[in-house]
């Protein structure tokens, strides 16, 4: 399977670039000796953005793999279950 089939990749890259910019801002906050609560909140936001991008990537991959290889009728149930499990990765 070619990576070019994953239409979600440009959106994921965009999310990750935003997270990268946010992380740079958090580093500046550390240098400015901002309060720990503010730092933790912003690090949590960066972590959430990266986790969201990862989850989207996993879901997209699962959809492509299952759609390409599953038998008709069974793909929907398998896909729902795998998406549910993937949120814990």
Image: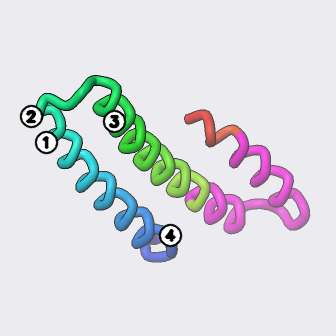
Q: Is residue 57 left or right of residue 35?
A: right
**Do the numbered discs 2 and 1 sit on residues whose CB atoms are within 8 Å?**
yes
Real-space Cα distance between discs 3 and 1? 12 Å
**CB atoms at circles 4 and 2 under 8 Å apart?**
no
Q: Which residue was labeled with disc 4? A: 8
Q: CA distance from mark 3 to mark 2?
A: 14 Å
The quadrant in which residue 87 appears is top right
Q: Is residue 31 above or below residue 52?
A: above
Nearer to me, 43 or 77 = 43
Marking on residue 39? none
**Residue lying at 39% horizontally and 61% vertically, measured from the top left:** 15
**Pair 3/4: label in front:** 3
Can you tell which of label 3 and label 2 is closer to the viewer?
2
Q: Would you say 39 lies left or right of 9 here?
A: left
Q: Earlier in the sequence, mark 3 or mark 4?
A: 4
- Crowd rating for badge 3 (residues with CA inside 10 Å; few <14, some 14–19, many 20+): some
Mark 2 = which residue?
A: 31
Marks 3 and 4, how far apart in space? 25 Å
Comes first in the chain, label 4 or label 2: 4
Q: Residue at x 63, y 60 (%)?
A: 65
Q: Classify mark 3: helix, strand or loop.
A: helix
The residue indicated by pointer 1 is 28
Region in magenta: 61-84
Q: Which residue is denoted by mark 3 in the rendering? A: 43
Residue 77 counted in the magenta span: yes
């Amino acid at each position: 399977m070619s990576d070019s089939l994953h239409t979600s990749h440009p959106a994921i890259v965009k999310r990750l670039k935003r997270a990268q910019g946010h992380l740079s801002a958090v580093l500046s906050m550390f240098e400015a000796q901002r309060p720990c609560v503010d730092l933790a909140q912003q690090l949590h936001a960066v972590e959430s953005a990266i986790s969201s991008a990862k989850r989207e990537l996993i879901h997209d991959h699962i959809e492509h793999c299952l759609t390409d290889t599953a038998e008709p009728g069974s793909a929907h149930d398998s896909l729902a279950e795998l998406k549910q499990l993937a949120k814990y990765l």
